[in-house]
């Protein structure tokens, strides 16, 4: 059960706001296993996978259409505008070379600027554990200052395929609010797309996932804590400059009090004794006071800040985000 809950923790967040690692060219998630071709085909697939891994490593520095955060070089020259979808971070060094791996972009990140006033955003919502599409999810676009989403900017309901489309207003900084998702039997979710959405970001379908009330109870049980109905919960995936779940990140939350519980994942299991993220990049807080919360992510080895973002926490709800390096003061 632990593996079922946590082996996809990073995919949970990357699917909801960023690039789902292992997606194929059609945007559909790859599934482990074979299609019934037998052992010989499995061996061939293993060889192909090895070649694909090598190709992926060779292409790791690529900054194509999936990139998401812009930066400037040492002379202050702006890089090309990007899509704001939470994808890989682009930057260049003083010589104009790519530095989109590790933490080399920290301090250079500049969020993209929209050139249109609105954009459409289409999502496909599925169940986190089972993967099946969720119909009748109320999907609302909300201003970042509207904690209850009492005045939604747009509202849609998912169809039988789990798909819904909302229109987003793009201010000077793009859409810097959140998506509110609600369905009976599931924990209400506040999903924050980072960096803010711009018009280019809204092309294609954006996967979203929801966690059942039972699933949250299981997670809380693994951590030895009882969910407080008057408080909310946060789950982040920390990303590095290449949009890879980041090892060795520590989290701070300005509203965390004695009742809030910080956790990281270790070997696919949530832990309150771990002190930094593992390869999943997953961290979070249970039983957080409702209201605005400023989260700061740091490198554990140096203490340097790599990201700082403000989210909203709502009683009885789950706040989620995939957090790449952000602009810093």
Image (spheres, rainbow, N blue to C red):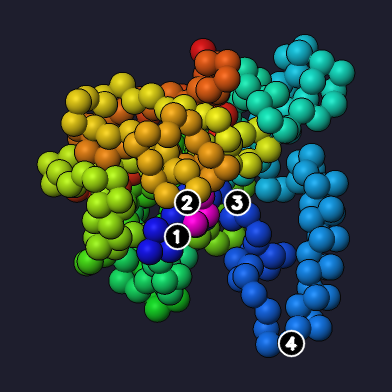
Between residues 82 and 217, which one lies in front from this camera angle? Answer: 217
Residue sitting at 47 percent across and 51 percent down? 268
Mark 1 and mark 4: Cα distance apart in space: 27 Å
Task: Answer with mark 1 or mark 2, whichever residue precedes in sequence.
Answer: 1
Left or right of 20 on screen, residue 118: left
Observer-nearest of 13 and 283: 283
How many angstroms separate mark 2 from mark 4 (CA)? 30 Å
Q: Residue at x 64, y 75 (%)?
A: 33
Q: Are marks 1 and 4 in contact (CB under 8 Å)?
A: no
Q: Earlier in the sequence, mark 1 or mark 3?
A: 1
Position of residue 306 measured from the top left corner of the image (x, y, whole percent): 55, 23
Instruction: State yes or no: discs 1 and 2 in contact (Cβ < 8 Å).
Output: yes
Residue at the location (40% across, 66% down)? 129
Residue beneath disc 1 = 3
Which range is magenta? 7-11
Q: Which residue is mark 2?
A: 268
- Using the image, determine if residue 29 lies above or below residue 94: below
Tag of residue 19:
3
N-terminal of the pair, mark 3 or mark 4, is: 3
Which badge, 2 or 3, is on the more N-terminal residue? 3
């Amino acid at each position: 059960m632990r593996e079922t809950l946590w082996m996809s923790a990073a995919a949970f967040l990357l699917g909801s706001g960023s690039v789902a690692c292992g997606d194929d060219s059609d945007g559909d998630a790859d599934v482990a296993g074979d299609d019934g071709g037998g052992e010989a085909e499995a061996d061939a697939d293993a060889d192909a996978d090895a070649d694909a891994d090598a190709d992926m490593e060779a292409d790791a520095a690529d900054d194509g259409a999936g990139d998401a955060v812009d930066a400037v070089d040492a002379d202050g020259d702006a890089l090309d505008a990007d899509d704001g979808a939470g994808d890989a971070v682009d930057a260049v060094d003083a010589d104009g070379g790519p530095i989109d791996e590790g933490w080399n972009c920290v301090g250079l990140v500049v969020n993209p600027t929209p050139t249109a006033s609105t954009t459409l955003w289409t999502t496909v919502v599925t169940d986190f554990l089972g993967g099946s599409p969720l119909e009748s999810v109320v999907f609302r676009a909300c201003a970042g200052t509207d904690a209850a989403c009492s005045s939604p900017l747009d509202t849609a309901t998912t169809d039988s395929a789990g798909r819904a489309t909302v229109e987003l207003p793009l201010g000077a900084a793009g859409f810097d609010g959140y998506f509110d998702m609600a369905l009976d039997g599931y924990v209400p979710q506040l999903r924050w797309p980072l960096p803010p959405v711009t018009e280019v970001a809204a092309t294609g379908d954006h996967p979203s996932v929801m966690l059942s009330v039972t699933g949250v109870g299981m997670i809380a049980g693994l951590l030895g804590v009882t969910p407080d109905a008057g408080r909310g919960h946060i789950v982040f995936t920390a990303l590095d400059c290449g949009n890879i779940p980041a090892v060795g990140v520590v989290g701070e939350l300005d509203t965390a009090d004695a009742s809030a519980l910080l956790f990281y994942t270790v070997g696919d299991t949530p832990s309150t004794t771990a002190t930094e993220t593992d390869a999943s990049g997953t961290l979070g807080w249970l039983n957080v006071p409702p209201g605005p919360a400023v989260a700061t992510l740091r490198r554990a080895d140096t203490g340097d800040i790599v990201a700082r973002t403000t989210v909203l926490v709502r009683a009885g709800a789950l706040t989620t985000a995939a957090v790449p390096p952000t602009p810093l003061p």
